[in-house]
Amino acid sequence: MSGRGLLSRVASPAHAGDETASIVEHLRVLLNARQGSAPSAPSFGVLDFSDVVHSMPGAAQALVKSIRATILEHEPRLRNVSVRHVTESGELVLRFEISAQLAEGRAGRTLRFATTVRPGGRFDVSG
Protein backbone atom coordinates (compact mmCIF):
# COMPACT_ATOMS: atom_id res chain seq x y z
CA MET A 1 0.00 0.00 0.00
CA SER A 2 1.49 3.31 -1.02
CA GLY A 3 1.41 6.34 1.23
CA ARG A 4 0.00 9.75 0.39
CA GLY A 5 3.13 11.72 1.21
CA LEU A 6 5.06 13.86 -1.21
CA LEU A 7 7.73 11.24 -1.83
CA SER A 8 5.20 8.55 -2.71
CA ARG A 9 3.47 10.89 -5.18
CA VAL A 10 6.77 11.83 -6.81
CA ALA A 11 7.78 8.16 -7.01
CA SER A 12 4.45 7.28 -8.63
CA PRO A 13 3.63 10.03 -11.15
CA ALA A 14 0.88 7.94 -12.76
CA HIS A 15 -1.44 8.75 -9.85
CA ALA A 16 -0.52 12.43 -9.75
CA GLY A 17 -3.00 13.44 -12.46
CA ASP A 18 -5.76 11.00 -11.61
CA GLU A 19 -7.72 12.51 -8.75
CA THR A 20 -10.25 9.67 -8.57
CA ALA A 21 -7.48 7.08 -8.19
CA SER A 22 -5.91 9.23 -5.49
CA ILE A 23 -9.23 9.46 -3.62
CA VAL A 24 -9.78 5.68 -3.88
CA GLU A 25 -6.29 5.06 -2.48
CA HIS A 26 -6.89 7.51 0.38
CA LEU A 27 -10.25 5.88 1.17
CA ARG A 28 -8.49 2.49 1.35
CA VAL A 29 -6.00 3.89 3.84
CA LEU A 30 -8.69 5.73 5.78
CA LEU A 31 -11.15 2.81 6.02
CA ASN A 32 -8.46 0.29 6.93
CA ALA A 33 -7.27 2.44 9.83
CA ARG A 34 -8.94 1.98 13.20
CA GLN A 35 -10.04 4.91 15.34
CA GLY A 36 -7.44 5.61 17.97
CA SER A 37 -4.55 4.11 15.97
CA ALA A 38 -3.17 7.56 15.01
CA PRO A 39 -2.27 9.44 18.21
CA SER A 40 -2.14 12.81 16.43
CA ALA A 41 -5.63 12.27 14.92
CA PRO A 42 -7.71 10.03 17.22
CA SER A 43 -10.76 10.18 14.92
CA PHE A 44 -8.78 8.97 11.88
CA GLY A 45 -10.21 5.63 10.73
CA VAL A 46 -13.40 3.68 11.38
CA LEU A 47 -14.74 1.62 14.25
CA ASP A 48 -12.80 -1.55 14.90
CA PHE A 49 -14.72 -4.22 12.98
CA SER A 50 -13.98 -6.87 15.63
CA ASP A 51 -15.71 -4.69 18.25
CA VAL A 52 -18.99 -4.50 16.32
CA VAL A 53 -19.18 -7.77 14.38
CA HIS A 54 -20.87 -9.53 17.31
CA SER A 55 -23.84 -7.17 17.16
CA MET A 56 -24.85 -7.96 13.58
CA PRO A 57 -27.03 -6.93 11.79
CA GLY A 58 -27.14 -3.65 13.74
CA ALA A 59 -23.39 -3.34 13.37
CA ALA A 60 -23.82 -2.49 9.69
CA GLN A 61 -25.55 0.80 10.60
CA ALA A 62 -22.82 1.61 13.13
CA LEU A 63 -20.25 1.09 10.38
CA VAL A 64 -22.29 3.25 7.95
CA LYS A 65 -22.19 6.13 10.45
CA SER A 66 -18.50 5.61 11.19
CA ILE A 67 -17.52 5.45 7.49
CA ARG A 68 -19.49 8.61 6.66
CA ALA A 69 -18.15 10.61 9.62
CA THR A 70 -14.57 9.58 8.88
CA ILE A 71 -14.80 10.51 5.20
CA LEU A 72 -16.41 13.87 5.99
CA GLU A 73 -13.66 14.71 8.47
CA HIS A 74 -10.59 13.33 6.71
CA GLU A 75 -11.24 13.50 2.95
CA PRO A 76 -11.64 17.19 2.08
CA ARG A 77 -11.96 16.52 -1.66
CA LEU A 78 -15.43 15.00 -1.09
CA ARG A 79 -18.69 16.57 0.06
CA ASN A 80 -22.33 15.46 0.32
CA VAL A 81 -21.15 12.00 1.36
CA SER A 82 -23.74 9.25 1.49
CA VAL A 83 -23.03 5.70 2.69
CA ARG A 84 -25.48 2.85 2.20
CA HIS A 85 -25.27 -0.75 3.40
CA VAL A 86 -25.92 -3.04 0.43
CA THR A 87 -27.61 -6.26 1.42
CA GLU A 88 -27.38 -9.34 -0.73
CA SER A 89 -29.03 -12.56 0.37
CA GLY A 90 -26.73 -15.46 1.08
CA GLU A 91 -23.60 -13.30 1.24
CA LEU A 92 -21.30 -13.45 4.25
CA VAL A 93 -19.57 -10.25 3.20
CA LEU A 94 -20.51 -6.71 4.19
CA ARG A 95 -20.89 -4.33 1.26
CA PHE A 96 -21.30 -0.57 1.29
CA GLU A 97 -21.91 1.97 -1.44
CA ILE A 98 -20.35 5.38 -0.98
CA SER A 99 -21.46 8.27 -3.14
CA ALA A 100 -20.13 11.80 -2.89
CA GLN A 101 -19.51 14.90 -4.92
CA LEU A 102 -16.13 16.37 -5.60
CA ALA A 103 -15.67 19.48 -3.50
CA GLU A 104 -16.06 22.96 -4.97
CA GLY A 105 -13.54 23.90 -7.58
CA ARG A 106 -13.66 20.33 -8.88
CA ALA A 107 -16.89 20.62 -10.91
CA GLY A 108 -19.18 18.99 -8.31
CA ARG A 109 -19.02 15.68 -10.16
CA THR A 110 -20.61 12.72 -8.32
CA LEU A 111 -18.40 9.72 -7.60
CA ARG A 112 -19.48 6.25 -6.48
CA PHE A 113 -17.32 3.77 -4.63
CA ALA A 114 -18.04 0.11 -3.93
CA THR A 115 -16.68 -1.01 -0.58
CA THR A 116 -16.46 -4.57 0.67
CA VAL A 117 -15.44 -5.67 4.15
CA ARG A 118 -13.46 -8.88 3.86
CA PRO A 119 -13.00 -11.47 6.61
CA GLY A 120 -10.76 -10.02 9.26
CA GLY A 121 -12.18 -6.53 8.75
CA ARG A 122 -10.13 -5.49 5.71
CA PHE A 123 -11.90 -2.89 3.53
CA ASP A 124 -11.59 -3.10 -0.27
CA VAL A 125 -12.55 0.07 -2.16
CA SER A 126 -13.10 0.44 -5.88
CA GLY A 127 -14.19 3.51 -7.77
Image: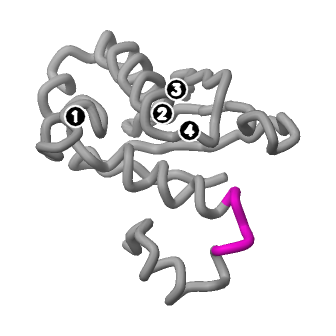
In the rendered structure, which segment of residues is drawn in magenta?
16-20
Q: Amino acid at mark 3?
A: Ser
Q: Quadrant of residue 109?
A: top right
Is 112 or 89 nearer to us in this picture? Answer: 112
Inter-mark Cα distance, 1 to 2? 17 Å
Circle 3/circle 4 CB separation < 8 Å: no
Circle 1/circle 2 CB separation < 8 Å: no
Q: Which residue is mark 3?
A: 89
Magenta stretch holds residue 124? no
Q: Amino acid at mark 4?
A: Pro
Q: What residue is drawn where x is 12% and y is 27%? A: 51
Q: Which residue is mark 1?
A: 49
Q: Which residue is mark 4?
A: 76
Q: Where is residue 115 drawn, in percent x and y?
A: 52, 43
Q: Quadrant of residue 111?
A: top right
Camera-nearest label, 1 or 4: 4
Q: Which residue is mark 2?
A: 71
Inter-mark Cα distance, 3 to 4? 35 Å
Provide the secondary structure element on which disc 1 rests: helix
